[in-house]
Image (cartoon, helix red, strand yellow):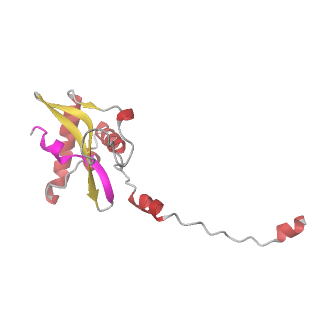
Amino acid sequence: MLASLMAAPVRAQPISAPNSDEAQTAEAADPYGRDTPEGTVAGFIDAIAMDNFERASVYLDLRNRRAATRARAGETLAIQLRDLLDRGGSIVPRAGLSNSASGNLDDGLEPELERVGTLRAGDREVGLLLEKVEEEAGERWLIASDTLRELPR
């Protein structure tokens, strides 16, 4: 009997394809982790900690900037954000950040907004907000253009 089992042909079994939801999630996964508020904040903080302002700029909502100046503006804004955080700004502790693609829906803000910290700009306090935006590759959480507009020039 053992000989017959050993001589039995082995056939490859097809691997089942992921269902369409799993396939879409895999395709839409963001290499920068901007799928959740927690991922966006962690990625941005890591980038500015390494003085990698080019990378930090991918976490900013720069859609309203001209394409020709977007890269330079993004790096400048990332430096400003770092400086404001260093001068008394605060970030919500990581455990308090939503790790859901939907964000925190019970925070009293619009569903596409997430408050993740505060910046001190002179005598003003500016909310550090993320906004869920639609990009070609899917929805991403980015530092809101409203927050960027509030930065001192």
Residue 40 drawn at (x, y percent): 32, 44
Which range of residues does the magenta coloring cover? 138-152
Q: Is residue 50 above or below residue 3?
A: above
Q: Is residue 12 above or below residue 56?
A: below
Residue 139 picture quarter: bottom left
Quarter of the image with the C terminus in it: top left
Quarter of the image with the N terminus in it: bottom right
Write the residue at 77% across / 73% down: 9
Horizontal side of 31 relative to 145 (left or right) equals: right
Residue 48 picture quarter: top left
Write the residue at 83% across / 67% down: 6
Horizontal side of 43 relative to 10 (left or right) equals: left
Q: Is residue 59 above or below residue 107?
A: below
Residue 61 drawn at (x, y percent): 22, 50
Q: Magenta segment: does it hold 129?
A: no
User: Which of 84 and 120 lies nearest the eye of the viewer?
Assistant: 120
Q: Is residue 11 above or below residue 72?
A: below
Write the residue at 17% across / 54% down: 70
Residue 131 drawn at (x, y percent): 25, 47
Number of disc labels: 0
User: Which of 73 and 105 lies nearest the eye of the viewer?
Assistant: 105
Write the residue at 40% across / 55% down: 29
